[in-house]
Amino acid sequence: MRKRCLPCCAWGQTGAGSRTGRERREHMREKSRIRQNRKEQQERFVNAAIGFIMLVSLGFPGKYEVIVGEQGDMAFQYLSFGLQIIVMLSAGRNVMEWRLVDVKLRYWSLYLMAAVFFAGSMAVTGYPREQFVTCVRFTVLLLFALWLSENREPEENLRLFCMAQAVFAASVLMFIVLYPDRAFVREVGEHDFTGILRTKNNAAAEVSFGLVLQAALYRIMRDEGKQIPRWFVILSGAQLTLLALCSSVGALVYAAVPAFFVLALSRRHVRGLPLGILYVAGSVGFLIAVQTVMPLAAPVLEAVGKDATLTGRIPLWRQIIQVMTQHRSFMGWGFCMFWRDRRAVALIHTAFSRYSFMGSMTTGAHNVLLELWLDTGLFGVAAFFLAMLVSTSQIKRLKDAQYVFCAAVILWFFLHGLLERAFSPSSYHTLSLLMAMGTACKKPRLQGRRWIREEDREQPIGTEETFYKKEEEI
């Protein structure tokens, strides 16, 4: 039987078709490489933007205004604000997916807190323009913190924070070399170290915060069997050196207690601490104790050469409580606006001599709870406590890395907030706390008798009794 042969034109068409197919596949691979490169470039930009935002929240440029000018700090603040919005918008794959607010029900208590701060402050403030800007900045910072907790793992956020800390520490060391007279100032003692920040307490708090975050990152990397990078060790040494220069016992305690908690204790002991209840009960109990127990112990403390007033804080707190029980107890003077109002500040100064430091002091209440009461009233304090309790209600069921991050930040904020204020609309205190509260909200949900995490909805990890056993097996 005679075989049928294809004509030459048919062979030519088949070859052309094959070449076209190869070209098409090569074209698709090239487009894929271009998309991958764009994605990597976008990721590098987002990481750089987040690092810059964290750096500014730490207080940069600070005293570098001698170089960038008096308006330089404000320019950095507004650039950071703009980058927060850009980073959140960049989460979408295209323009149609751009959205600034990605509302999720599990964050309802944090949204409620922001709404109470915003509405209550605008209702009572005597500075509507400044108040509006402050509330908008706080709201955007809250949304940005929730975006970070939603889209980034705790290790990634800690690594970026530590990189920002490294840049900040390098800028401080450079400032010491360039302007030693400005880095060491006469504040309370002789040659107090302030670095590029305004006060000794601010510098010490920033360093202690950095050490706590490094301890948390080390714990997470150690549990996952990862190698500790060299820059991490260098940064820890630099931070310890700066902490020694600060000569602050309080900052040493702020750093040591949370670091010991996340490093030395086992998983079972670490998970057993109810952080939300500890924060609320400890903050209120501390103020009650210093107003009742400290006056009784004053003779003993003074006999051994200790200050029974906590460097004048106890008389200040007593006066603040008296003022707030008589004026605007429920609404306050507006978020971050009390110390801007001269008539309000005069109410505090009336209890002290006109020529004393406390009679002219305008640097804050030196306590987070009292500062929040002055600004937002009892309604704001209640909203903050509710957000703290709701967000941490199931914190023991988080993943290990998530719990370590939340524990480190909340413990540091709790201890630091006992003696200092730490709730401004753009600082690292507020950003890190909101990130921790947002991360704590990512708890598993109970469906029947099974705990299911948000990211593992299709793969239940076991019953409540076997939760931790399954966690270790994973």
Image (spheres, grey):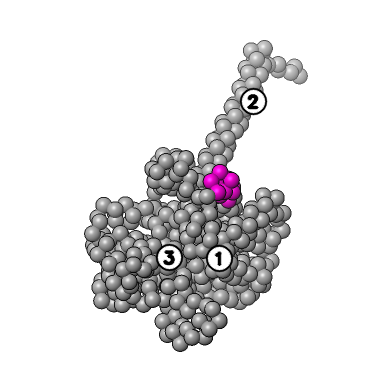
Task: Decide if residue 142 is on the left or right side of residue 254.
Answer: left
Residues 405 and 245: in front is: 245
Give SS at disc 3: loop
Counting other residues with Cα less than 10 Å from the Cα at mark 3, is it few (<14), some (14-19), or many (20 or more)? Answer: many
The C terminus, quarter of image: bottom right
Task: Decide if residue 304 is on the left or right side of residue 18.
Answer: left
Residue located at (33% from left, 72% from top):
352
Give SS at disc 1: loop
Residues 3 and 154: in front is: 154
The residue carrying mark 1 is: 248
State yes or no: discs 3 and 2 in contact (Cβ < 8 Å).
no
Return the disc, 1 or 3, that comes first in the chain's sequence.
1
Residues 450 and 418: in front is: 418
Tell which tag, 1 or 2, sits nearer the viewer: 1
Task: Decide if residue 140 is on the left or right side of residue 340.
Answer: right
Find residue 421 and name its label. 3
Give the x, y percent position of residue 101.
39, 52
The secondary structure that dominates the magenta segment is: helix
Tell which tag, 1 or 3, sits nearer the viewer: 1
The residue carrying mark 2 is: 22
Residue located at (48% from left, 45% from top):
64
Q: How much space separates mark 1 and mark 2, taking CA atoms?
A: 69 Å
Q: Residue furthest top?
A: 8
Q: Where 216 falls versus 323 (above or below)? A: above
